[in-house]
Image: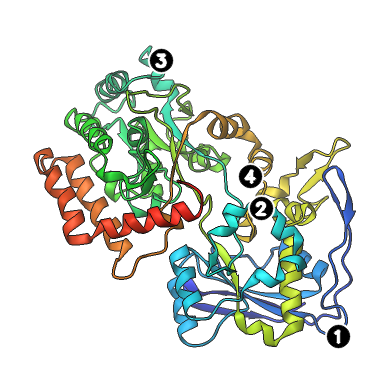
């Protein structure tokens, strides 16, 4: 079977051609608790499988991948997958050159809207009955976010559960004879004790109790260093649109956001906050967590609790225990929780409008997505090959086999998302209790900016960058809080955020999030 994987972000093109006879018809695969099903044949009537170009997968698929070849065999197609590492500028360049892929990943609704205006996207409204599994997978509200002028121009992804919470060095907490904090005063008391007790035993005053990451890279899924502060005051990350009193607002403009910023400054002035948070990336943060430079971090189980991550975080101190705080910090305004985009997972897949002139290929694409929306395909894309990567016991329970850990790129080929709790608690069974805790016990505060089309004359990226930069200056004291009102005024005067907020209110009313 011919297979081509192009990794554009590395500026390499690899062409792998292996001669193959006509692929066999679909082979049934047992589903959890249901009879097996067979995907509808679309390409089996010709000697060669139909080639579908799929652009923008956010991860590199290794040559040894067994999952995509199995999907191709079941559907009688040849998927030419091109990875961009999530860099949509590569798609923009390709579209500008008129080289439009058959199927492509779009990361924001604003971008989807731009492609719609350029007549690049196929209107899927007339094809819903041909892919009933996809049609029924999403709610009316989820479909509404990919609608323009009554048409449907993208296929959503299923939302993921919350992964985020406060993490703390439990062994340090025990050494200090303290419990998980329930207030910021208690958290500050613990943080000061961690700074002063030389718990890493190196005889140096080089520990900042609280660390993490900060910036636009963490905004969609949260996981930023200060998220536990924002949410405890009932607000989401500074640059995000949230709903307050049935109205869309920019989080940073709320009084509660200022209170949260003043709270963070109190911790900074106490000397317990890592001054390098803004420059940290995940690797540098993991190093600080492993070497005893920090004892409290806000983040996700998926970045702290997987087996390889635990090995990293205990590489210097084998007895180190990085575990979630099991109490929530409360204020008069909220409870420390997690922020999450209401769209759940912002990327959608769109189809080239020109495929109407290639009916056989279009039929193959429609059938491919309809099959992806089955339980049978969920098992394949989530867990791999039955008998090789997983088994299903007599009760219909998916059981992980050792080879499942080889599918580290699997999240990138789950094109319509996945049954998240089943996937996570099966694949990462070592921390299933933490996964369940984050999903079910941590309060989630939603933000909505990814649902809003960028208004004409407004550059949302510039607004977000300016807000994040200025808030960091207030946090670390390079701007005094007496300048806060001037900062907010500048957002309205220089960045016209009222236009953005008005657009958000209009969109969120149309989608039914506010009335």
Name the side, left or right, on which 255 lies relative to 408: left
- The answer for how far apart the CA atoms under marks 3 and 1 are is 68 Å
Q: Nearer the viewer, mark 2 or mark 1?
A: 1
Q: Which numbered tag is attached to residue 47? A: 1
Q: Nearer the viewer, mark 2 or mark 3?
A: 3
Q: List the residue tagged with mark 4.
A: 420
**Colouring of the image:** rainbow
The residue sitting at 23% across, 52% down in the picture is 469
Q: Nearer the viewer, residue 283 or 23?
A: 23
Q: Nearer the viewer, residue 473 or 400?
A: 473
User: Helix, strand or loop at disc 4?
Assistant: helix
The x and y percentages for residue 37 are 87, 57
Q: Quadrant of residue 253?
A: top left
Q: Residues within 10 Å of mark 4 (few under 14, many from 20)?
A: some
The x and y percentages for residue 349 are 59, 66
- The answer for how far apart the CA atoms under marks 4 and 1 are is 38 Å
Q: List the residue tagged with mark 2.
A: 406
Which numbered disc, 2 or 3, marks the residue that appears first in the sequence? 3
């Amino acid at each position: 079977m011919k297979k081509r994987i192009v990794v554009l972000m590395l500026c390499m093109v690899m062409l792998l051609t292996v001669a193959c006879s006509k692929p066999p018809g679909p082979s049934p695969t047992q589903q959890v608790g249901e009879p097996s099903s067979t995907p509808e044949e679309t390409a089996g009537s010709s000697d060669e499988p139909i080639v579908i170009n799929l652009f923008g997968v956010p991860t590199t698929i290794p040559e040894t991948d067994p999952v995509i070849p199995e999907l191709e065999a079941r559907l009688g197609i040849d998927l030419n997958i091109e990875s961009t590492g999530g860099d949509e500028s590569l798609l923009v360049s390709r579209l500008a050159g008129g080289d439009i892929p058959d199927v492509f990943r779009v990361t924001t609704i604003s971008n989807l809207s731009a492609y719609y205006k350029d007549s690049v996207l196929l209107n899927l409204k007339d094809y819903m009955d041909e892919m009933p599994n996809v049609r029924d997978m999403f709610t009316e509200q989820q479909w509404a976010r990919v609608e323009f002028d009554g048409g449907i121009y993208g296929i959503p992804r299923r939302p993921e559960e919350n992964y985020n919470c406060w993490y703390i060095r439990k062994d340090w907490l025990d050494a200090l004879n303290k419990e998980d904090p329930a207030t910021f005063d208690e958290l500050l008391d613990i943080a000061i004790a961690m700074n002063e007790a030389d718990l890493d035993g190196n005889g140096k005053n080089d520990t900042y109790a609280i660390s993490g990451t900060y910036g636009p890279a963490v905004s969609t899924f949260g996981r930023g260093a200060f998220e536990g502060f924002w949410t405890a005051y009932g607000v989401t990350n500074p640059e995000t649109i949230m709903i307050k009193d049935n109205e869309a607002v920019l989080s940073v403009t709320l009084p509660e956001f200022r209170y949260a910023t003043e709270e963070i400054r109190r911790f900074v002035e106490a000397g317990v906050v890592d001054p390098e948070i803004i420059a940290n990336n995940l690797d540098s943060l993991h190093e600080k967590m492993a070497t005893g430079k920090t004892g409290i971090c806000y983040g996700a189980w998926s970045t702290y609790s997987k087996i390889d991550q635990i090995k990293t975080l205990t590489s210097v101190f084998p007895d180190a225990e990085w575990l979630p705080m099991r109490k929530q910090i409360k204020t008069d305004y909220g409870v420390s929780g997690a922020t999450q985009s209401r769209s759940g997972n912002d990327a959608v897949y769109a189809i080239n409008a020109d495929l109407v002139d290639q009916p056989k290929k279009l039929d193959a694409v429609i059938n491919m997505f309809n099959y992806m929306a089955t339980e049978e395909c969920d098992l394949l894309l989530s867990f791999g090959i039955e008998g090789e990567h997983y088994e299903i016991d007599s009760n219909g329970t998916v059981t992980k086999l050792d080879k499942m850990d080889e599918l580290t790129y699997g999240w990138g080929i789950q094109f319509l998302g996945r049954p998240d709790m089943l996937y996570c608690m099966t694949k990462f069974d070592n921390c299933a209790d933490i996964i369940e805790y984050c999903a079910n016990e941590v309060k989630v505060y939603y933000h909505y900016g990814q649902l809003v089309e960028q208004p004409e004359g407004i550059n949302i990226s510039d607004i977000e960058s300016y807000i994040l930069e200025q808030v960091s200056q207030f946090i670390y004291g390079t701007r005094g809080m007496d300048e806060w009102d001037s900062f907010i005024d500048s957002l309205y005067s220089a960045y016209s955020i009222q236009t953005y907020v008005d657009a958000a209110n209009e969109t969120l009313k149309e989608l039914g999030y506010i009335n």
